[in-house]
């Protein structure tokens, strides 16, 4: 049977998955507490933006809670940013993460989570559950401090 009869030429894009480790396993940071995660996020957050606009980042971890990388999900406006759960899952899967720590800043300095923050956390946690990735925390950070969903029993 001739499969090319009456069909136009097809061009299909190939999807390639890769993850390049540039940090030796022995040099990777380990996350044991929410403070560990806060220190790592504080180190990589742009100090010129933390009080200006809201950003969302994800810490990608292996089974030993070693940091595989940080994924910058979004950068928004003064009062919000969009964190697409699909992009978070793509980054976690691509890096072969077994757990993640969510993080966003509140430029106002008010660390109390909004209903939207709580809803998004539940949504991402549920999506991760189906692919065996654990959301171990969600931090809301400011220049000086942080709020941990896990420490407050919200995870």
Image: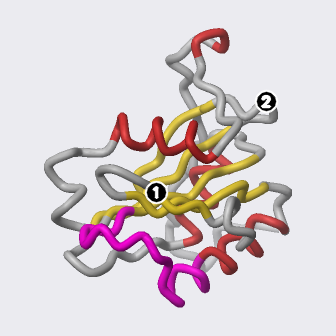
Q: In this view, does 132 lie above or below 129?
A: above
123 inside magenta stretch? no
Query: On the picture, is 26 further left or further right than 114?
Result: right
How many numbered markers are drawn?
Answer: 2
Q: In this view, does 20 lie above or below 105?
A: above
The kind of secondary structure element at disc 2 is loop
Residue drawn 21% across the image and 67% down it:
53
Q: Nearer the viewer, residue 85 or 8?
A: 85
The quarter holding residue 26 reads top right
User: What colour scheme governs how the chains and residues are painted in the rendered image of this protein?
Assistant: secondary structure
Residue drawn 60% across the image and 57% down it:
90
Q: Kindly identify which residue carries mark 2.
A: 64
Part of the protein shown in magenta: 105-120
109 inside magenta stretch? yes
The image quadrant where one finds the N terminus is bottom right
Asked whether residue 6 is in view, the answer is yes
Q: Residue 146 carries which label?
A: 1
Q: Position of residue 94 (x, y in %)?
A: 63, 45
Residue drawn 68% across the image and 29% down it:
66
Residue drawn 60% across the image and 32% down it:
68
Asked whether residue 12 is in view, the answer is no
Q: Where is residue 152 in the image (x, y as percent from the top left)?
A: 68, 67
Q: Where is residue 58 in the image (x, y as percent from the top left)?
A: 52, 52
Query: On the picture, is 86 further left or further right than 140?
Result: right
The kind of secondary structure element at disc 1 is strand
């Amino acid at each position: 049977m001739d499969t090319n009869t009456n069909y136009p030429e097809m061009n299909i894009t190939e999807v390639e998955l890769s993850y390049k480790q540039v940090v030796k396993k022995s040099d990777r940071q380990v996350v044991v507490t929410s403070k560990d995660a806060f220190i790592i996020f504080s180190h990589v957050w742009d100090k010129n933006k933390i009080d200006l606009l809201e950003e969302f980042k994800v810490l990608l971890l292996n089974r030993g809670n070693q940091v595989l990388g940080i994924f910058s999900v979004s950068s928004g406006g003064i009062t919000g940013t969009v964190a697409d759960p699909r992009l978070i899952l793509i980054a976690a899967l691509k890096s072969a993460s077994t757990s993640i720590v969510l993080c966003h800043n509140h430029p106002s300095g008010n660390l109390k989570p909004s209903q939207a923050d709580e809803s998004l956390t539940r949504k991402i946690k549920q999506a991760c559950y189906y692919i065996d990735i654990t959301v171990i925390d969600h931090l809301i950070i400011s220049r000086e401090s942080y709020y941990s969903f896990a420490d407050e029993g919200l995870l």
